[in-house]
């Protein structure tokens, strides 16, 4: 077989592996190989290639299981439209942006997947914050992540926070106990706050989006340069984000 044909077949096989992981995730090598009727060695080579390209990664809870990354999900952002999240959120995001004059981020969350930014409305201020679409958001260090954690069962929270928690700044919650303490406050307020815990120079407030069954499927966040953010501003922005989240949640389609 000509080298060009072999290369093309390898590319096609790798893309098929990506599609199969998207359908089965989290999925192990054996399950993927069975679904594709391919040798496990071939599947493993494709998985390694896709991991190096940052399209796939292993699950946080089981390193033998493979899942999509934010990079892969960013290409499939239109799938979020089909699920109704971005459509349900757009009007409330626009109102929240116009009321606060700050950048609004919409993140999507699914079981065994990263929290991923799927939409953004930019501030009209000359100094503004910015996160690219498809960015993976840390659950413990972000207001969006902690807003979602506050609505999850304790066992799921423990699983998501297992292992070492990455520190992004001196304000990042350093351990599960610190996060658990904050989650109690989040449940009382109805929103989470973030004072440079993830990104230096950025404050934020965020609230969870709940499906009709009360399951968090994402979060909406107001992201603010630290020059315009303090505890008093957070107390103003937090209820606005929580109100927007309630309106978005009410618009989500019932499965």
Image: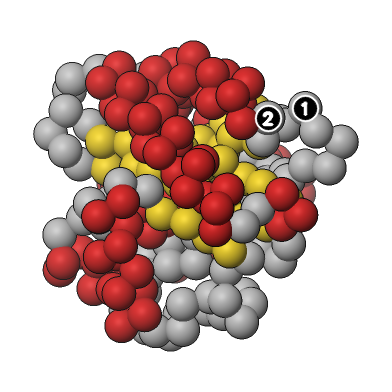
Q: Secondary structure at mark 1?
A: loop
**In this orientation, does residue 99 appear?**
yes
In this picture, residue 247 sits left or right of residue 100? left
Residue bearing the label numbered 2: 101
Residue name at image x 33 percent, y 36 percent:
209
- Report the front residue among 202 and 8: 202
Residue 116 appears in the rendering: no
Q: Please tell me which residue is depicted at 87% across the width and 36% down the height of the picture.
A: 126
Query: Residue 220 has which mark?
Result: none
Query: As drawn, is 126 to the left or to the right of 54?
Result: right
Would you say the residues marked 1 and 2 are in contact, meaning their CB atoms lie under 8 Å apart?
yes
The image quadrant of residue 117 is top right
Circle 1 is placed at which residue position? 124
Q: Residues within 10 Å of mark 2 (few under 14, many from 20)?
A: some
Label 1 to label 2, Cα distance in Å?
6 Å
Residue at 30 percent across and 17 percent down: it is 251
Helix, strand or loop under label 2: loop
Asked whether 109 or 48 is in front, the reply is 109
The percent coordinates of residue 46 (x first, y second) are 53, 58
């Amino acid at each position: 077989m000509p080298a060009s044909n072999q290369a093309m077949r390898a590319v096609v096989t790798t893309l098929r592996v990506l599609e199969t992981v998207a359908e089965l995730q989290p999925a192990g090598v054996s399950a993927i190989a069975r679904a594709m009727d391919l040798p496990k060695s071939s599947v493993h080579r494709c998985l390694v290639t896709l991991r190096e390209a940052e399209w796939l990664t292993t699950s946080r809870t089981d390193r033998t299981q493979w899942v999509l990354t934010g990079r892969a999900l960013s290409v499939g952002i239109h799938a979020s439209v089909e699920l109704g999240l971005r459509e349900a959120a757009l009007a409330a995001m626009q109102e929240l942006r116009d009321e606060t004059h700050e950048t609004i981020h919409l993140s999507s969350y699914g079981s065994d997947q990263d929290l991923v930014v799927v939409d953004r409305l930019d501030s009209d201020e000359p100094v503004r914050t910015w996160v690219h679409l498809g960015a993976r958001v840390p659950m413990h260090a972000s207001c969006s992540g902690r807003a979602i954690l506050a609505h999850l069962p304790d066992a799921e929270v423990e699983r998501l926070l297992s292992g070492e928690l990455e520190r992004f700044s001196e304000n990042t919650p350093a351990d599960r106990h610190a996060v658990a303490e904050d989650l109690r406050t989040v449940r009382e307020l109805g929103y989470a706050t973030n004072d440079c815990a993830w990104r230096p120079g950025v404050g934020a407030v965020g609230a969870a989006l709940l499906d009709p069954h009360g399951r968090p499927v994402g979060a909406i966040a107001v992201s603010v340069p630290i020059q315009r953010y303090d505890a008093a501003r957070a107390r103003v922005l937090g209820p606005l984000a929580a109100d927007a989240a309630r309106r978005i949640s009410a618009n989500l389609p019932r499965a």
